[in-house]
Amino acid sequence: MESLDQRLVSTWSHDHSSVPLSYVQPLESRPGSKVTNHNSCKTIPVIDLGGHNDRAHTTKQILKASEDYGFFQVINHRVSKDLMDEALNIFKEFHAMPPKEKVNECSKDPNGRCKLYTSSENYKIDAVQYWKDTLSHPCPSSGDHMKYWPEKPTKYREVVGKYTQELRKLALEILELFCEGLGLNPRYFCGGLSGSPHVLVHHYPPCPEPSLTLGLAKHRDPTVITILLQDQLVQGLQVLKDGEWLGVEPLPNAFVVNIGLLLQIISNGRLVGAEHRVVTNLTTARTSVAYFIYPSMESIIEPAQCLMNETTLPVYKSMTFGEFRRQFFEKGPKIEEELQKQDLMNNIIFLFLSTPTSPLTTVTKSPTSGKLPLL
Ligand code: OGA
Ligand code: NI
């Protein structure tokens, strides 16, 4: 078995003029020749957080974008352009280091939570591999985990420390807007539900046959929300909308925000995490930085109780985030059945018997319009 430094796509891909068989996607998930013709007519909404609009208007825009696409971009968000550039450059420098050095720099955490992997976290069990390498680690606001982060490039901890602090502020600001829109307490996400943020730095090397491969499989994020910094030079992220893949155009100084499965559960299916994937390209390496809002392991994930009443019943089960994660990685797409409440019918019967005059329509509505996740 090859070692990790040998398996990294960035280690070997430049001497390949075709894609190894283990990276060729089955026909139904191949991007095909349309990979470079991004649909430029439809794009995901762009939201200005710079106070040019009143707050109620911004909240409305965010909810509409989330209901329509599950995705939006934010501009004028107060994270400085210099810090965004500095962070992206440090992350690019990390992935450009010699393979053994990258592995060493990610071997300091005794719990293995600062990690480097290739393809997906399920490399060993994935039937087909993905054209990417990823560095991932926790980035709690306490700074506690920083001692396990890479020390090279030399400014890594300083820059990534500053960047993730700023991203936390931005995430809480966006989550507060969601609270206002959904009717939740404005501090609903401030504690355990945003307690364990992680950063995932993806690197997609140039690929000799982009029509056959994927950088990242079609999936929904196992997060509350995700805030993504994209490379300006090259497009790769695509969102599934009405059966069509839409490219997410990199805008200067913008972040891409998407709804994760956890916000889908908390909002009781009002907001739905959109499916997305990453395609590769022939000439230019792409780096993207995902900031994942993860709850702490013991946090309870469930439809917000204040949104429930006699006519709106929870359509998802309640479980700890630890249990959710375990099932997410174990069951893959089958988590759909696991998350939804099995006793929905019992609830309806109970409701019918106890309040025969109540309208039942909201209860019987399907919780989601699409299928649940894959990663
Ligand atoms: C993710 C993700 C998109 C990208 O990390 O979940 O969807 O462009 N990333 O790398
Ligand atoms: Ni994602």
Image (tube, rainbow, N blue to C red):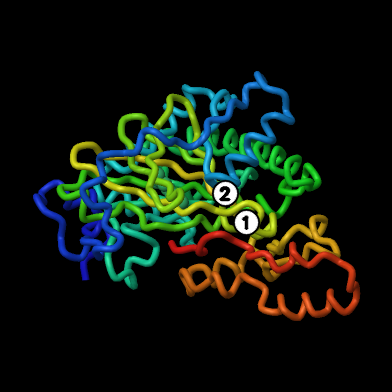
Instruction: State the residue position of label 1.
Output: 264
Nearest the viewer among 335 and 311 is 311
Please provide percent x and percent y for residue 130.
Answer: 29, 58
Left or right: residue 252 versus residue 60 is left
Q: Are marks 1 and 2 in contact (CB under 8 Å)?
A: yes
Whether residue 136 is visible here, answered yes or no, is: no
Nearest the viewer among 129 and 63 is 63
Whether residue 264 is visible here, answered yes or no, is: yes
In the rendered view, tell whether residue 103 sits above or below residue 363: above
The quadrant holding residue 115 is bottom left
In the rendered view, tell whether residue 234 sits above or below residue 223: above
Please provide percent x and percent y for residue 279.
Answer: 30, 48
Please provide percent x and percent y for residue 288.
Answer: 39, 41
Left or right: residue 209 versus residue 83 is left
Nearest the viewer among 91 and 337 is 337
Local crowd size for mark 2, using a 10 Å CA cut-off: few (<14), some (14–19), many (≥20) = many
Mark 1 → mark 2, Cα distance in angstroms: 7 Å
Name the secondary structure under disc 2.
Answer: strand
Q: Residue at x 62, y 27 (%)?
A: 49
Q: Residue at x 62, y 22 (%)?
A: 50
Left or right: residue 348 versus residue 374 is right
Q: Amino acid at mark 1?
A: Gln
In the rendered view, tell whether residue 246 sits above or below residue 359: above
Mark 1 vs 2, N-terminal side: 2
Quadrant of the drawing holding the N terminus: bottom left
Instruction: State the residue position of label 2.
Output: 259
Please provide percent x and percent y for residue 296.
Answer: 65, 58
